[in-house]
Amino acid sequence: MTVLKGIKIIELAGIGPGPFCGMLLADLGADVIVIERPGGGDLPAAITRRGKRSVALDLKSPESIETVLRLIESADALIEGMRPGVMERLGLGPDVCLSRNPRLVYGRMTGWGQDGPLAQAAGHDTNYIALSGALWYASEAGQPPVAPPTLVGDLGGGALYLAVGILAGILNARSSGQGQVVDAAIVDGSAHLMNLMLDLIGGGLGSEQRGTSLLDGPHWYTTYRCADGRDITVGALEPKFYRLLLEKLGLQNDPRFASQNKTAQWPQQKQQLAELFATKSREEWCALLEGSDACFAPVLAPSEAARHPHIAQRKIYSEEGGLLQANPAPRFSSSPAAATRPVPKVGEHTQQVLEENTKSSR
C-alpha cells in the first residue's frame, strides 16, 4: 500500500510549482484529480501531470463551479496557483470551499504570497529568490548570481513547502476536524532555505561577502573544468576529507595548500587547482577520485546521469514514451511508491470521477 493511499487532492490546473506538488503527492499514492480546461486538445507530454486523473471543466460556467465544489466535499486538500483574489472571483475561495468541507486543506501556491505590497505583481522563480536572499550566494565573488532554473524557488521554496504544508494540514484536520488555508509563497520558502547559510554567518563561518563563506568560496568546495571541456566537483569540507583530496592529487606536501580555511588564500588556491584539473579529462579524474572520501563527483547532464552505474542501479531515472524522467522519491521500506501512470489526456477521467463522486454523495 502506498503511503498516501486514500488521500484525495483536487488540483486546479496551472504551471510550475503547483502541478509539481500535485505530481509529488500522486507519486506517493494520493488520488490527485486535476481540473483542466476542455477543448484545448492534448497537452504536451508533461511529467508533472503523471499519475493524476484529468477532469475537464469550464470554470467560467456556474455548473462547473458547482461540480468542483461537490468534488471538494469529499477531498482532503485543494491545490491552486492563481494570483490572490482570482479563486474568490470564481466562487471557489477558501470561505466557500471550507463551508462545503470544513476539514479541507486549501493549498495556495504563489510567488509573493497572499498579502504584502507585491502580492498582485507578476514574477518568476528568479525574482522571488532574488528578493528573499536565496540568490545572493549563487555566484563566484565579483560575478552576477546565476541559480539552477526553477530548483531553488519554484520547486525547493515553492512546491516542496506546499506539499509539506498540505500533509501537515491533513494530519491536523484528522485530529482536530478543522481544515485551513496553507499560504505557500515561494519568497517565504526560499528564505527559509537560507537558514543553514544564516547559521554559518551566525557561527562566524560565513558573511554576506561572496566568496568568503564556508560553502560558497573555498577551493575545496566548488566546480572545475577539465581538459576535455567537461566539469567535476569537489566538496572536501571536513579536514580529514581535505587531507585525502590533497593526497589523491599529490599535493599533501605542497605548502600552498597547508591551510584549508584561510579565506584570503582561497582565490589563489582555487586558481592553482583549476590549472591542475585542466590537465586531465573528466574520466581520468573520475578514475582517480570517484568513490573515495575525497568528496568528488562528475557534473553530469541528466541523460548522462541516468546511465551512471550508481544512478542506474538505484533506478533513479526511467524512460516513459521516450521521455526521460526521475522516478518517485523518497523511498519507503514497506510502502512502495505508486506506479507512474501515463500522462492523462485532457478530460480522460471526467465521467469516471463524476460518477464516483455521485455514488459517494448518496
Image (cartoon, rainbow, N blue to C red):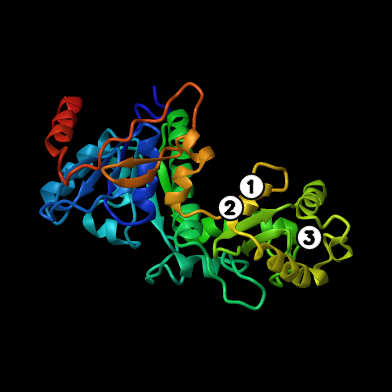
Q: Which residue is mark 2?
A: 283
The residue where tag 1 is placed is: 287
Which quadrant is home to the C terminus? top left
- The percent coordinates of residue 44 (x first, y second) are 23, 53
Instruction: Measure the alpha-carbon separation of dots 3 and 1.
Output: 33 Å
Question: Element type at marker 2?
Answer: helix
Label 1, residues with CA under 10 Å away: few <14, some 14-19, many ≥20:
few
Q: In the rendered structure, are the residues bearing label 2 and label 1 in contact, judged by CB atoms less than 8 Å apart?
A: yes
Decide if residue 150 is on the left or right side of residue 276: left
Q: Are marks 3 and 2 in contact (CB under 8 Å)?
A: no
CB under 8 Å between callouts 3 and 1? Answer: no
On residue 205, the disc is 3
In the rendered image, the vertical position of residue 115 relative to residue 42, given as above or below: below
Residue 182: x and y in percent read: 43, 48
Q: Nearer the viewer, residue 193 or 61?
A: 193
Identified at 17% across, 29% down, the residue is 356
Crowding at mark 3 (Cα within 10 Å: few <14, some 14-19, many 20+): some
Amino acid type at image mark 2: Glu
* Residue 200 sits in quarter: bottom right
Residue at screen point 48% across, 47% down: 305
Which amino acid does the dot numbered 3 rest on?
Leu
User: Dot 2: within a 10 Å radius of its alpha carbon, few (fewer than 14), some, or many (20 or more) residues?
Assistant: some
Spatial CA distance of label 3 from label 2 is 34 Å
User: Which residue is depicted at the point 77% across and 59% down?
Assistant: 202
What's the mark number on residue 314?
A: none
Residue 105 in sight from this viewpoint: no
SS category of the residue bearing label 3: loop
